[in-house]
Every structure is written in structure tokens, then in C-alpha cells.
Image: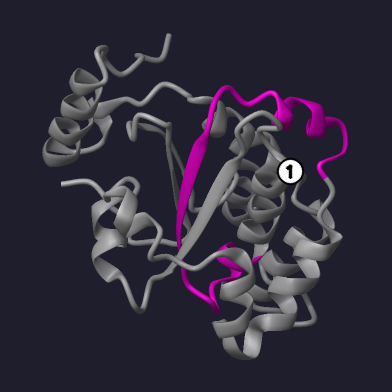
Amino acid sequence: MTVTRDQFREGYTWDEWLEVVGENREAWRSRYEEARLGELRAEYQLVPGARYVLCVVDEACTDSMGTVPYIAKACEQAGAAEGVELRIFSRREHPELLRQFQSQARLATPVCVVFDDAWVQVGRWGPRPEAAARFIAHWQPDAEGDSLDQALDLWYSADQGRSTLREFLAVLRGQGVEPWRAGRRASQRLWKQAEEAGGEPERAV
């Protein structure tokens, strides 16, 4: 069972999220204000048709704080013709959404799911860009004794959202959804959505 349009609109807008996020508000706000699409801005504005982006986040999660503010800025500036609508759901308030859209059997945040105007799921992203995953794979404690979370937060600050914005653009455009990698129940749900839309999920080549 997927999220309905009405359920989607029960999520927080970006401005509403900043009002409820608590002690980490400044980290979320500052990254959003500093976010720049740069050379990707024109491509984001050419996103085909309306898009609806559901993000499940943890307000204290380094990956959530390091990526979702940039995704929020991208959604605000994307799709010049029909626009992109973002709703944010707290993992604490909606654990069922994280379970429903989990990636690779991991209950990690953020997970961002994209629907088109026919309310078919056309993409999913999270919990971190590939470059951040590589950084974690090779990370070792330094002499200053920084934790992995501290090091990852510094990595996100240095990256300035570039890795996230590049990857999320492909998802927003409607990357191939591969149901056979999503688990049996998720696979059945994705195929059903595609059949109702008159097609089938695009297989990656």
C-alpha cells in the first residue's frame, strides 16, 4: 500500500519543518540558505512534469542534515513549468513510512521517494550520496579523535551538496525503478503502480 496524495500533504513543508526541528534548526537552516544549484539549475528546471517528493528524515541524523536541505532548495527551484512539491516526515513520528520505503533492508535516513502527477513512484534516493559512502568506507580516526559523525558532517560541509544534487536530479527526472531489488512486497506494489499508469517500471540497462 503506497502513500496517498492526502497522506503526502500531511507532511511538513520546508518552512514548517524548520519550526518543529528543535535544537538542530540552525544546521538545517544554514545549509538550506547556503545551497546553490549552480550549473545544475537549468537541468533542474527542465524536470518533466509535476513531481512530489516525500522525505523521511531524522532531525539529528548527520546524513539527513547533510542532504535534505539541498534537496529542499532543489525542489523549490526545479520544474519551472509545473513545479516540485516537497513534504518532510519525521522518522520518530512516522516509523511506518521508513519501513515501507526502506532501502536495501536498512532503516537509515533520509529516504526520499518521488511520485509523478499520476501518483506513480518514479524514483527513490537515500540515505547518502555515493561519494559520502566511499568516504565512510575509507575513514579512519585521526589524531584529534573526531568521531565518524563529526568527520562526515565536515565532509558534507565541504561538499556543499554537490554530490547530493547530482544524484537527486536523476531521481527527480524519473530514473528506472527496479522492483526485483526492492523485496517481494515492494516489488508487487511498484509493478501494480506501473500497470495502473499503463506501463511498467523501466529496467536499468
Tag 1: amino acid: Gln
Hey, which residue is sitting farthest top in the picture? 205
Say whether residue 14 is magenta: no
In this rendering, does residue 148 appear at all? no
- What residue is shown with label 1? 77
Position in image of residue 187 (x %, y %): 18, 32
Position in image of residue 113 (x %, y %): 42, 45
Name the residue nearer the viewer: 155 or 170: 170
For the point 57% across and 82% down, the residue is 21
How would you rate the neighbour count of disc 1 (Cα within 10 Å): few for under 14, some for 14-19, many for 20 or more?
some
For the point 74% across and 43% down, the residue is 77
Q: Is residue 158 left or right of residue 43?
A: right
Position in image of residue 9 (x %, y %): 40, 59
Name the residue nearer the viewer: 204 or 86: 86
Looking at the image, residue 97 lies above or below residue 113: below
- Number of labelled discs? 1
Position in image of residue 87 (x %, y %): 49, 58
The colour scheme used to paint the residues is one colour
Looking at the image, residue 8 lies above or below residue 198: below
Looking at the image, residue 87 lies above or below residue 190: below
Kindly indicate the quadrant of the structure image that contains residue 202: top left
Q: In the picture, which quadrant includes the C terminus?
A: top left
Say whether residue 53 is magenta: yes
Q: Which residues are magenta?
A: 37-65
In this rendering, does residue 4 appear at all? yes
For the point 35% across and 47% down, the residue is 103
